[in-house]
Image (cartoon, helix red, strand yellow):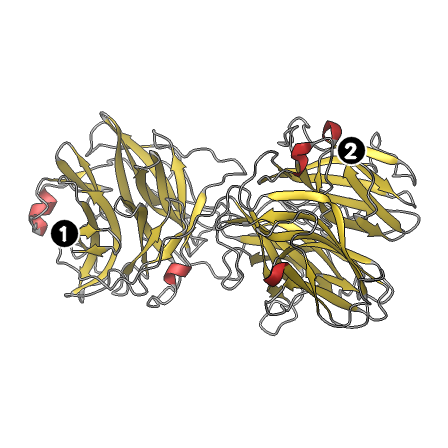
Amino acid sequence: MRRKMVTRGLGQRAVHARPRLLTRIGNVAPIVALLAMSLSIIGNPDRASAVAPGGFTGVNPVRVIDTRINGQGPCLAPGTIRSVVVAGIVGSGIPSDAAGVAMNVTAAGSSLPGFLTAWPRGGVRPETSLLNYAANDVTPNNSVMSVGAGGAIDFFANQGCPSLVVDVVGWFASGNGTVGGFNGVAPTRLLDTRSTGDGSCVTSPRLLAVVNVAGVPATASSVALNVTVTNSDLPGYVILWPAGASRPNSSTVNFVAGEVRANATVSKIGALGAISIFSSGGCPHVIIDLVGWFDGGASFGVGGVAAVTPYRVLDTRSASNTEGCLRGYRAVTMAGVPGSGVPFDATAVLLNITAVSPNASGYVTAFPDLATPPTASNLNFRAGQVVANGVWVKVNSDNHRVTLFASGGCPHVVLDIVGFAVSSMQPAPAPATVGTQAVSGAKWPDVSDPAVMTDGGKYYVFGSNTNVRNIPVRTVTDLTRTYTSTGWEQATSEAMPTRPAWARQDEKTLWAPTAAKLAPNFYVMYFAANRPNAPQPWNPQCIGRAFASLPQGPYTPETAPITCGIEGTGGALDPEYFHDPVSNTSYLLAAFSDTSFSIHVMPVDTWGAPIQQSDAAPPRVIELRRALVGKQTPPEPGFIENPSMVYDAATGTYLLSYSYGDWNTANYSTGVVRCSSPVGPCSLQSTTPWLASGNSRTGTGGLSFFAGLDGSTRAVYASWPQGHEAQGGYWRAGSLAVVATGAVPTLR
């Protein structure tokens, strides 16, 4: 339940500092990750594991070479080969046995135009180019490369002596991979329209078979390609997409007349094991090199990768884009966008970024939202240019966003999603149709956000603050009894006599307590409170923790909160403790008030402390956007809170309830989803409220599951007597229900 909270306007967001410039090349965005553009993945005969399928792990960018710096030069002279160690560097997080790496490669300041080639150390230099550069220009490109002898990659430039900058942003595991794992191959030319037998330049759509070529099996889900356009008589663009699907409104490579332009992509395989190719105009020659493929399957394991039919997620030229061209920073939601095919738990997205008609030279960088802005460029542009590049970008796991930055020139920017990576993805349980449940009469007076702990044959009922107590608690032995206000108050005690030092002392707001027994004579309580001087005054809530030796307390709060949500964007509220009997793992569920459609699920250890998470395994989020489709529109559309979870042994799934609307109105309601694990994914169980106003009771919310002494699953929730909403005092009261789980959850 929210107390004294002001909802943040959509136009407000954290302000980033301007990136530091270093000759327009800097550290790649943390993490501009995974298999990105100009995917030159070269098989290495000396490392059998180098081309084995394996999941992807992102790391904070590691700069492994910058030949502009003394001691790392000189520039890459024509005809010379420079070996660069990319794996096993102390402190990099990249193991020495990594099968491959994702890296950002930049050529800068060459005296002549040319091309750059890379391959695993010890292998044969290929004929393909990693990137093409112009004289005195800065040309970045992203690549995935198998690692060669000594954990190194070799680089070669044909002319001009460009400076070489390489940043490693992630790695692929060797050995057996998971579904969606990557399989690198020696580059194989699938199409070259300049050659006899491959047809003429591209003037009409054509199909290109990619299955059963160079070892790509029929079970592959997608292919990694390097696409080059050359010798066009007019400017235009080329699109690749799955055969049999509708042609998307997106581009893979943009080009001007007479130019040689390369870009890489991951393309989903379509009908007949093929992809489609289209050119918008002119008659460009198109060269397509296969550099790898991804395992297919019904579900993904850690690091799994999949391609989607290209989906346009942003076009600043469109009439619906009221912010216009890209001036400075802009956050864009990437994961879970309806129609994109990208799931909510996507850890990274493969983007094709196009800059259109800037009024001055500059660069565009993409990085995880709210991360420290990098000093790198994903693409560089000149005034009036249309230029595109692809990049894998890590997605902020809390709000599903990526931030864009333009250094100047106010370019229009077009973003197309063509692929994604996940940390894990299981099939969601089947949707169900569950009708609105009847609301029972009040049993426990003056109980808001009620929660029940069972211990020693008794029930301990906790509630939000009252005019008398910080956290009231009442011991109950008979769940069938209905209490009067006077009788309830006389037997209610104070669970936490001392307010936490970190919370505001000038208000009574302490709410949504949840308690659990951790060991004999050792109990933990989580609760929400407002902190003073919050960075964002519209959302000052934090979650605290307290301990006691008796179930009813007194609980002693810690001197600091355990979480205040995502710092810089909002607070955290409505904690709920849940112990998963399947994995024997404990979780803390909470609503983070900057992510209005999400419930955060944080693992906690046996003492109730949050488990420290690495970059590879951040606190997980259950995304409920789909669960809210079709529900009644509350006064505050979209915000959800008050999570509670219970395991349903009959189906091996989890029920997650949540509240939405405004807690002090008749429109406060309870929804429910079914999840395949404590961290999702979840599926819709009710297109209307699971609990809504009725039987002269309104504002039914704050539901909390608990175990009955008879082994039944119970739930407690609060409601108002009709006509007395938001009047406080003893009006808000708790009701009880028995939960029948099974295939269709019901309350009775």
Q: Residue at x 78, y 45 (%)?
A: 106
Q: Secondary structure at mark 1?
A: strand
Asked if residue 313 lies left or right of residue 639, the reply is right
Identify the mark at residue 121; answer none if there is no mark.
Answer: 2
Q: Secondary structure at mark 2?
A: loop
Quadrant of the rendering where the C terminus is positioned: bottom left
Give residue 704's position: percent from left, percent from top. Answer: 25, 48
Asked if residue 382 lies left or right of residue 170, the reply is right
Q: Residue at x 11, y 52 (%)?
A: 443
- Of callouts 1 and 2, the N-terminal one: 2
Q: Residue at x 51, y 64 (%)?
A: 339
User: Which residue type does callout 2 highlight?
Assistant: Arg
User: Which residue type does callout 1 highlight?
Assistant: Pro
Q: Is residue 557 above or below residue 250?
A: above
Give residue 421's position: percent from left, percent from top. Answer: 56, 48
Quarter-wise, where is residue 726 in the image?
A: bottom left
The residue under label 1 is 445
Identify the mark at residue 422; answer none if there is no mark.
Answer: none
Give residue 390's position: percent from left, percent from top. Answer: 69, 54
